[in-house]
Amino acid sequence: MIERVVAPNPGPMTLGGTNTYLVGVGDGSGELAAIDPGPDDPRHLSAILETSRRLGRISTVLVTHRHLDHLPAALPLCRETGATLVGHADLPGVQRVIRDGETVFGALVALETPGHTRESLCFWDASDGSLFTGDLVAGSGTVVVDDQPGALADYVGSLERLMGLGPRTIYPGHGPIVHDAVSKLTEYLQHRRARLQQVVDALALRGPLTIEELVEAIYTDVPVSLHPMAARNVRANLEKLASDGQVAALSGQRWRLKA
């Protein structure tokens, strides 16, 4: 049993709002796990509690990553239900630290999948092919990669790892549920490779460019208000290309192709 409760925080980055999932253990006990309780919003907390009373009792709270649209309601939900907060060691307030490959609730297994953030986790149920991705994959559009060194390589590696599982259904942190998981992961991998090539092509065509100039050249279909997020992705692409020996940084914050 999987029930979705959508937080009232729609926006360009959150799409229709943060998806909180209530997952049943499947043994008739009525125990539930709440995945990504969401923002600190009393309306959303009330909606989670109301839904859970109809389905059973929340005993475990799982969090995919630290961002403010996923984590803040976790501790209030634990206080209301007596549930245990389970997550990565880097998350504040975690009562049970989980590690890669550990079974966390019922058949759900935690997978370390860095890239969106360094501590990002996905939760995988091999019994039915369900994959809870947090912000590693969205139901529509793409996601922002962390701006830490090596984040893009980590992100692509995480997508490839998920692809290797052969999942059936993706339950994303934002947007609609994805019923053809492999196609979505293929789309995401192709998108990342295409973005890398766009950076190379822009530098080849226009010569040394700043990150801001690359954003303007590549993200022509993205509102200016989202350019700061696009700049993070461009920076991650440049860092990956630099590590591969394809580009080099110049003075004045410009980048060029290496011969």
Image (cartoon, rainbow, N blue to C red):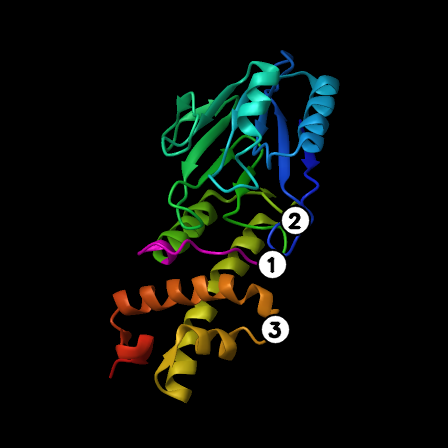
* Three-letter amino acid code of the residue under disc 1: Gly
Name the element at disc 3: loop
Height in image: 97 above or below 117? Answer: above
Residue 140 or 180: which is nearer the viewer? 140
Residue 63 relative to residue 207: left or right: right
Mark 1 crowd level (few <14, some 14–19, many ≥20, 10 Å Cα): few
Mark 3 to mark 1 CA distance (whole Å): 12 Å
Mark 1 to mark 2 CA distance (whole Å): 9 Å
Name the residue carrying label 2.
175
Residue 78 at x, y percent in the picture: 55, 20
Residue 27 relative to residue 136: left or right: right
Name the residue carrying label 1.
141
Residue, far top: 29
Residue 106 visible to the viewer: yes
Magenta includes 106?
no
Residue 51 at x, y percent in the picture: 73, 24
Height in image: 104 above or below 223? Answer: above
Magenta extent:
141-152
The residue lying at 54 percent from left, 30 percent from top is 127
> Do the CB atoms of the residues marked 1 and 2 lie less than 8 Å apart?
yes
Placement of the N terminus among the 4 image quadrants: top right
Quadrant of the rendered structure where residue 36 is? top right
Residue 198 visible to the viewer: no
**Along the polypeptide, which appears first: circle 2 or circle 3?**
2
* Three-letter amino acid code of the residue under disc 2: Gly
Name the residue carrying label 3.
221
Residue 166 at x, y percent in the picture: 50, 44
Residue 251 relative to residue 94: left or right: left
